[in-house]
Image (cartoon, grey):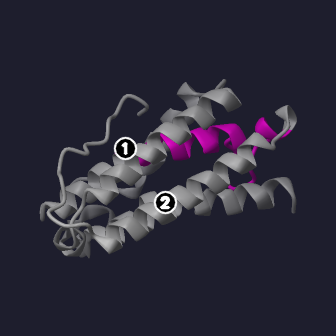
Amino acid sequence: MTNTSISTDAEPSTTSHRANALADRLEQGARALIAFARGLTAEEWQTRTPQDGRTVGIIVHHVASVYPVEIQLAQIVADGKPVTGLTAADIDAMNAQHAAENAGVTKEAAIDLLQQNSAAAAAAIRALTDEQLANAAPVSLYDNAPLTCQFVLEDHAVRHSYHHLDRLRRALRP
């Protein structure tokens, strides 16, 4: 996952205030997760979470590593194309594989990747036009419901750091 790149080739015809707001929210969530991660002790970094058993460190790295995939899915919908063949089971398998392959991830490596990939994700979001954000297409992960690009961004890339940050805080400081 860490080698997947985010395409930022598309130049918006006009600045999209919606795209900028989405990118700003993504960056805010990433900064909050980075600040949280920086404050963790070595023991906290290795703590297994009650939700799924992954360590805190793996989850921080997970958020960083899936930004490219989340942006790619949104870009597919932005182009008016359907997202096909993606299921919850695929996501679970991807997460399990990521955890197995990155068991020894260091805090520094995870934070670096989080900084890089969140910046690239924000740039890709800012490159979207209002028309692209409003485009809708069937998304297999949601039973082929026609969803907008903006929804896909909000439910995945933008929300992801907030979602996991809340769970990690609760896991470490119940």
Residue sitting at 74 percent across and 50 percent down? 36
- In the rendered structure, find residue 68 and report the number of the disc placed on it: 1
Viewer-side residue, 64 vs 81:
64
Magenta region, residue range: 44-68
Kind of residue at badge 2: Leu
Image position of 15 with respect to 1: above or below: below
Viewer-side residue, 127 vs 67:
127
Viewer-side residue, 59 vs 9:
9
Whether residue 170 sits left or right of residue 97 in the image: it is right
Is residue 93 in view? no
Q: Position of residue 50 (x, y in %)?
A: 75, 53
Viewer-side residue, 128 vs 40:
128
Viewport quadrant of the C terminus = bottom right
Q: Position of residue 139 (x, y in %)?
A: 25, 65
Q: Place residue 17 in its image quadrant.
A: bottom left
Q: Is residue 47 magenta?
A: yes
Q: Is residue 104 magenta?
A: no
Is residue 40 in view? yes
Residue sitting at 18 percent across and 53 percent down? 11
Residue sitting at 60 percent across and 63 percent down? 163
Q: Position of residue 142 (x, y in %)?
A: 32, 69
- Nearest to N terminus: mark 1 or mark 2: 2
